[in-house]
């Protein structure tokens, strides 16, 4: 009963019962660790947005509220009676305790989840944009010459140059010299981590370039940029998606390492990295200041890694066949 | 072979020059200056700042500063902004401190990862495999300094072992064996902690390489002709799985400089990573640039070494 405008027979008639996405999802779903990671990440996203809303709009929830009489209280303790009424924490308790200024660690962690997550995601988006552009151009225009040397050689040598910099050292240097801000950290992590993506995309493009659908697109006279970004990039995304997931984990770890060395995101922003780095001074008196953010980072980074590995397995056609 | 070598070496040298120019650009275009390290110091008058800028050639145009740096570096006269000491001997001294830590870490990583990875591959899907996989991911995901702090607490409280610095304060006059043991403890604990992540990454890699090889026809043939399992695994499978790891030896080299900033900072270990960190804090440009240059040179040298090693062990590869 299809309307006549639908000239293509539907997928089942062709025998291909599933879209590629469904195939990947079917394999991915079997991987229990990866599914657990996905659940953690989904709840983290919800938490991050919830945290952003709560800490922005609800004054008692403000992570910057200082309650000096209540400093260094262990988790689940109730506020002291000397506190003014409008300063009482919501729910009448501190779920994760308080820090050296009596700030509510739970509120700070909530705020930090949004900041940490956005550091990871923005940094990786920057690296994806650079990596896909460089890799795509190198793969597509590879043979064209520019001043005696092919474009491919130019771009890949550029990638080699950036690869030769000791990454963490470079990040440290730049972050130390630039005025401290959360955006600089995102940008610096982004522009020092695109090389892997560029190489993946180039390798995929070298194979895709010879495929019939690209020839067809060229024969139709489509502009080259449209061929690259509309037709070829989506086909080259599988390995990129995997490495991007793992890169987010890496970016979150880098941010915490920078905080540890004193170059992290500055106050008033709370990130899990700088809560952890500040907490180490109180490791004997208030271990929760150290253990809570540390475990949170561990769980989230682990979740990103597991999802990345699960995706890699699910997108690998060799393994997929074996699984089914 | 000879032509390949000359061409790659020349290419790498050119790359090195480009890298040093870019690192100069990064450092000089970024807004921080050595004179701004201590802006609140009342003793720093405008005239002093001008004098310092003059002495460090900071007012010269960019290309002149670069030429100064290259000239001083290769004549060995490059001096640190921070304390006026020559840069190269200072780096050499720190290098001697970093080397034992680096060697010890590498040794632990390589000896621990192979048995773990091979076993995981042989017993694919078993409880052992799944447990090590999960532990490996956990170790990869944990912030290095978080784990170290927790473990330091454990080591110091439970085993009463010394952990910070090169040796325990006040043991200079102790007997030689005592001092040796003291050194060993100070070396082993940071190495183990720095090695944990490495073991996790490398054992995963060993596992996937072994899985790839173990399905090959020649392994089945070896089994079919009745060789014992150990011979099949170690004589036939492992030897072929080892090939990609030869290349990794080359990539180890740069880790000597930048790999250990965090661990050297935690354990107050006066090595190259900590030197770089201090230089960055003090905006000691000559030191930062030289360390960066050396790290890049080590990376390029490492890639070259691994290419050559690969050609050496794998007869299928021919360099041209």
Image (tube, rainbow, N blue to C red):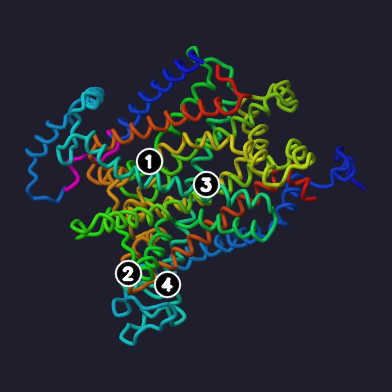
Q: Label 4 to label 1, Cα distance in Å? A: 46 Å
On the image, the x and y values in percent for residue B249 come to 48, 36
3 and 1 marks in contact (CB < 8 Å) = no
B30 inside magenta stretch:
yes
Q: Tell me the residue at 46%/56% (across/down).
A: A116
Q: Label 2 to label 1, Cα distance in Å? A: 32 Å
Q: Chain of mark 4?
A: A
Q: Chain of mark 1?
A: B
Which residue corresponds to mark 1? B256
Q: Earlier in the sequence, mark 2 or mark 4?
A: 4
Res. B51 mark: none
Which span of residues is magenta-colored? B28-38
Which residue corresponds to mark 2? A282
Q: Tell me the residue at 56%/47% (across/down).
A: B114
Res. A61 mark: 4
Which residue corresponds to mark 3? A247
B4 inside magenta stretch:
no
Judge the density around disc 1: few (<14), some (14-19), many (≥20) Cα neighbours within 10 Å. Answer: many
Q: Earlier in the sequence, mark 3 or mark 4?
A: 4
Q: Secondary structure at mark 2?
A: helix
Marks 2 and 1 on same chain: no
Q: Secondary structure at mark 3?
A: helix
Q: Secondary structure at mark 4?
A: helix
């Amino acid at each position: 009963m299809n309307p006549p405008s639908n000239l293509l027979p539907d997928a089942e008639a062709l025998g291909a019962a599933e879209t590629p996405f469904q195939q990947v999802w079917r394999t991915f779903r079997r991987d229990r660790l990866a599914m657990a990671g996905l659940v953690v990440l989904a709840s983290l996203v919800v938490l991050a947005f919830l945290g952003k809303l709560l800490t922005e709009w609800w004054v008692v929830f403000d992570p910057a509220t200082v309650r000096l009489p209540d400093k260094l209280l262990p988790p689940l303790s109730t506020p002291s009676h000397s506190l003014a009424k409008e300063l009482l924490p919501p729910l009448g308790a501190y779920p994760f305790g308080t820090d050296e200024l009596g700030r509510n660690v739970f509120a700070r962690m909530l705020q930090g989840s949004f900041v940490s997550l956005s550091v990871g995601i923005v940094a990786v988006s920057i690296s994806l944009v650079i990596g896909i552009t460089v890799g795509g151009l190198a793969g597509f225009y590879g043979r064209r010459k520019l001043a005696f040397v092919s474009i491919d050689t130019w771009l890949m040598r550029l990638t080699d140059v950036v690869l030769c910099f000791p990454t963490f050292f470079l990040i440290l240097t730049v972050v130390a010299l630039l005025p401290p801000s959360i955006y600089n950290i995102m940008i610096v992590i982004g522009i020092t981590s695109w090389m892997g993506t560029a190489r993946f995309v180039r390798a995929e493009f070298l194979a895709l370039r010879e495929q019939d659908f690209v020839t067809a697109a060229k024969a139709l006279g489509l502009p080259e940029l449209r061929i690259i970004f509309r037709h070829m990039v989506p086909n080259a995304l599988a390995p990129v998606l995997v490495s991007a997931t793992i890169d987010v984990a890496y970016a979150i770890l880098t941010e915490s390492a920078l905080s540890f060395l004193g170059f992290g995101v500055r106050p008033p922003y709370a990130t899990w990295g700088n809560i952890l780095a500040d907490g180490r001074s109180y490791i004997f008196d208030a271990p929760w200041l150290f253990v809570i953010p540390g475990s949170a980072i561990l769980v989230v980074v682990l979740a990103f890694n597991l999802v990345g590995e699960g995706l890699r397995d699910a997108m690998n056609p060799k393994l997929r066949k074996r699984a089914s | 072979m000879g032509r390949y070598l000359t061409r790659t070496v020349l290419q790498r040298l050119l790359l090195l020059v480009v890298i040093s120019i870019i690192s100069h650009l990064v450092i000089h275009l970024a807004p921080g200056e050595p004179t701004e390290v201590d802006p609140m110091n009342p003793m720093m008058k405008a005239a002093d700042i001008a004098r310092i800028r003059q002495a460090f050639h900071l007012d010269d145009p960019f290309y002149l500063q670069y030429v100064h740096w290259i000239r001083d570096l290769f004549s060995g006269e490059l001096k640190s902004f921070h304390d006026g000491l020559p840069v190269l001997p200072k780096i050499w001294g720190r290098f001697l401190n970093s080397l034992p830590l680096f060697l010890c870490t590498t040794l632990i990583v390589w000896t621990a990862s192979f048995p773990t990875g091979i076993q995981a591959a042989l017993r694919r899907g078993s409880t052992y495999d799944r447990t090590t996989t999960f532990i490996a991911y956990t170790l990869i995901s944990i912030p290095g300094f978080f784990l170290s702090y927790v473990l330091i607490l454990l080591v110091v409280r439970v085993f009463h072992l010394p952990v910070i610095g090169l040796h325990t304060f006040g043991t200079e006059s102790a007997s030689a064996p005592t001092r040796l043991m003291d050194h060993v403890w100070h070396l082993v604990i940071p190495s183990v902690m720095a090695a944990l992540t490495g073991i996790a990454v490398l054992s995963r890699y060993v596992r996937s390489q072994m899985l790839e090889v173990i399905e090959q026809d020649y392994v089945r043939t070896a089994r079919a002709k009745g060789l014992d399992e150990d011979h099949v695994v170690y004589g036939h499978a492992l030897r072929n799985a080892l090939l990609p790891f030869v290349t990794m030896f080359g990539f180890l080299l740069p880790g000597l400089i930048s790999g250990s900033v965090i661990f050297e900072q935690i354990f107050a270990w006066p090595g190259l990573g900590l030197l770089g960190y201090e230089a960055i804090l003090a905006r000691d440009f000559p030191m930062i640039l030289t360390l960066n240059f050396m790290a890049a040179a080590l990376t390029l040298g490492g890639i070259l070494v691994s290419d050559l090693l690969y050609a050496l062990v794998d007869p299928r590869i021919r360099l041209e």
